[in-house]
Image: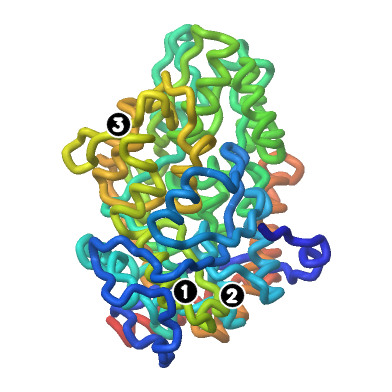
Amino acid sequence: MHQLTRRQLLAAAGGAATFILVGCGDDGDDSGGQDLDSKRVGAMENYGVGDTFKATEELTFSIAILDNAAYPYKADWQFFQELTKRTNVKFDPTVIPGSDYNQKRSVMIAAGNAPWIIPKTYHPSEEEYIAGGAILPVSDYVHLMPHFQDKVKKWNLQPDIDSQLKQADGKYYLLPGLHEDAWLDYSLAIRTDILSQLNLQVPTTWDELTNVLRAMKPLAGPYPFSDRWSKQPEGPGANALLAHMSDAYDTRAGWDWQPYHWDSNAGKFVFPGATDNYRKILEYLNALVNEKLMDPESFTQEDDLARQKFATGKSFVISCNAQTVVNELRKDLTERNPKATVVKIPRLMGPMGATKRQSRLENGVMISKKALDSKNFVAMMQFVDWLWYSDEGQMLAKWGVEGQTYTGSVEDDTFKLAPDVDWAGLNPSGTKQLNVDYGFFNGVFAYGGSTKFLNTQFTEEEKKFQEVMAQRQLRPAEPAHPLTPEEREQTTLWATALKDHVNQQSLRFILGQRPLSEWDAYVQELKGKNMDQLMEVHNKAYERFKKEHG
């Protein structure tokens, strides 16, 4: 296992990603002009859909592994043992704490010592590495990946790839997670016993939430809403909250930030941090802070402190996902107060009404260009295809070994966890945790899949949430507007400075350190940081692509 040195960290140049996942309209079978005959050592001679990949000799592939604090990395997890047993492949891992993953990934790539396989890469962070040539245009090599190609074809995902992922060179540089259907997870968790005590209904809109928080305030100590997920670099804090608020307000913020947003009314891309909708989000949150309905520490505190406040009844509302509401929030809460109840509520609606913005593509895998120099390159691509995209590989990564960690079948709806195994409350009597104790359902490897496969991870409670979200109208995806390498290099510099300023000033606006009456001055500051030039490049790229491809 490799560890990054302080010297490597300090040597890295800063740079924020701009938000574009890349894609190709064909099957990418030209191998980038590379002769792969000398790179097939360990590869299977005949490898196709339904085949289990097994290297013809023992192989070791270097990989970056995000170490999740909720299930810390263990080299002896059964997942790794079973993976080697089935595929004849071992990992040479570089294990990175989740809070530092993006930064340290950049350090490794900039220093030229990145592992071959770089998973858990969220669109569009691969873009900052394209110009330097450090990562492969993976679309040139998907012809080596029959399971990937099969799911793209079977689920008609090529239009998603074309519209969301395509670069000006017609290639893409990230192998995305593939979902059969679109789905949402993150929302708010609310103490329903407090709602009952106050004779209140679960809120359905952001305005209704304000009224609920006002009613809760006398019982809280002193803020009814104290949030989490504020230490990641994607936003000014409370990044999950800002992300799903930005969906409701038709802009981009928090985890969903990107330096451009399609304005369907204007028919052009606009800078989200300067829009009226973005301002409305800041006004809303500022009002909560001013009324002491929301803890100002929500935007800076560690997750553990936010969880502690919720568990001890100092707050009643917090961001969550399906896993955390059961594994963390409900567990923490009921240990102290057995009568307390908490649920994950459907995403609150705002000006966009009962609509949603989401993609069938998820975070994915980058491949270091160094891997192409290896005689084992083809075998590695076959292995990546099997583990991340085959039904068998996904089943292993998510649920483990039949007869040991689970029984039954996904296809006939008989799947269930073994009696002594639990994950996210699916089997509350289980004494062992699937991810903590076995290493299965590790977010580095387990994402994507069919709708039936996805449904296996849901409790009945979560299925109800998904039913509500499935009824909301899916808004059209933003149109493609791939940039040239030169445009990308320039816009990355602009976008980095703009994002930093948006994050800093957004926090000041929310906390009341800067009055919202200075909004126009703030927009002028963005203009001074090349906002208009950035949008001009993106809109020219849109017009160019539309002219060339219709």
User: Residue at the location (41% across, 36% down)?
Assistant: 347
Taking 67 as reference, is 484 above or below it? Answer: below
Taking 470 as reference, is 259 above or below it? Answer: below
- Judging by the rendered image, the residue that carries numbered circle 2 is 129
Colouring method of the image: rainbow
Q: Which amino acid does label 3 sit on?
A: Lys
- Judging by the rendered image, the residue that carries numbered circle 1 is 173
User: Residue at the location (30% across, 61% down)?
Assistant: 52
- The answer to whether the residues at label 2 and label 1 have Cβ atoms under 8 Å apart is yes
Q: Residue 416 carries which label?
A: 3
Image check: 104 left or right of 538?
Answer: right
Q: Can residue 461 be seen in this view?
A: yes
The one of 458 and 230 positioned closer to us in this rendering: 458
Dot 2, how many residues are within 10 Å of its Cα: few (below 14), some (14-19), or many (20+)? Answer: some
Q: In which quarter of the image is residue 153?
A: bottom left
Name which of mark 3 and mark 2 comes first in the sequence: 2
Q: Which amino acid does label 1 sit on?
A: Tyr
Name which of mark 3 and mark 1 comes first in the sequence: 1
Residue 216 drawn at (x, y percent): 56, 16
Q: Which mark is residue 251?
A: none
User: Residue at the location (33% across, 73% down)?
Assistant: 44
